[in-house]
Amino acid sequence: MSPPAAIDRESSLRLLGEMIRLRRFEEKCAELYGQGKIRGFLHLYIGEEAIAAGAMPAFSPEDNVVSTYREHGHALARGISAGAVMAEMFGKVQGCSRGRGGSMHLFDRRTRFFGGSAIVGAGLPLAVGLALADRMLGRQALTAVLFGDGAVAEGAFHESMNLAALWRLPVLFLCENNLYAMGTAVERAQSETRLYLKAQAYRMPGEEVDGMDVLAVAGAVRAAALAVRSGEGPRMLELKTYRFRGHSMFDAQLYRTREEVERWAARDPITLFRARAAEAGLIGEADVAALEQAADREVAEAVAFAEAGTLEPVETLGQDVYRREVAP
């Protein structure tokens, strides 16, 4: 088990501020969805913020990050502006994918954030391909791929793990296990529920991490990333977490009890870390209030930016779309 990250005032403010920022953004998205300003599918990250906040600082600007359809938190923590993410969800051309991707397809070349995908597990082979390309080009970079527990049941997971291990590619596999693949509990879908053990089938080190503890996440991801960078081959971390909202905004959540949700809510990563940092004398109530105000301002500015954005003209909708010309 990797040791937790060191805690000091500066890192405490940064980690707590990042988690509050992601939470406020997602809460606003839920509100805007109810108003009909965000449409389509929307998968919220509420409850899982410790993973994005703890993991992303371990990656350099040269590294690649591949995500899932529950990606808002990943994108923001990686450095994509809140305005660009919100504009994307509004379908505006000022969005990070020019309004064509929406919630599930965020992409940003500048931060080497290679997007999410609506297909479960689709990012896994992409991550292996990026790592292989970097090796062939002589780039010294790591590729981190985030995926949910549901992706572990996909063939792409096993194929990707096998190739990464066989070729000793610099890939860090990060499984966000929130216990439910849509509405199917892990124990109903996996004969071995300790998902990190699946790495052993590919002679790859695996480790379970408390995904509700931002310091545990930060320490484990930093150590695993260092090992991958050192040429020790790929690694897998299973980050045990829980989403407080449904799978998507359409989810009635009939598969889990209110008692279960309340039990996990008692381990809210923001509440836990705030109490821990306060007990250590590193932050006070004024600090928390300042972080919350900053997050609220950023989210409000992101919404204003998105609302002021423009929709793509109908005449250009066919650009960048592959069309096969069929001879008459």
Image (spheres, helix red, strand yellow):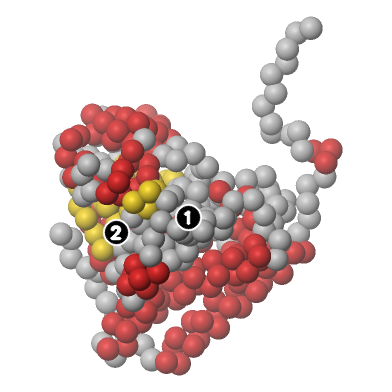
Where residue 100 appears, as percent x and y from the top left, is: 67, 45
Work out how far the residue at label 1 is from the one at label 2, CA to CA, in angstroms.
16 Å
Amino acid bearing label 1: His
The residue under the point 67% across, 27% down is: 322
Mark 1 or mark 2, which has the lower sequence index? 2
Where residue 148 appears, as percent x and y from the top left, is: 38, 49
Which residue corresponds to mark 2?
240
Where residue 119 appears, as percent x and y from the top left, is: 49, 39
Quarter occupied by residue 9: bottom left
Q: How many marks?
A: 2
- The quarter of the rendered structure image containing the N terminus is bottom left
Quarter occupied by residue 152: top left
Q: Nearer the viewer, residue 34 or 44?
A: 34
Amino acid bearing label 2: Lys
288 above or below 34? below
The residue under the point 62% across, 46% down is: 101
Label 1 packing within 10 angstroms: few (<14), some (14-19), many (20+):
many
- The quarter of the rendered structure image containing the C terminus is top right
Label 2 packing within 10 angstroms: few (<14), some (14-19), many (20+):
many
Which residue corresponds to mark 1?
247
* Res 78 seen here: no
165 above or below 146? above
Per the image, label 2 sits on a secondary structure element best described as strand
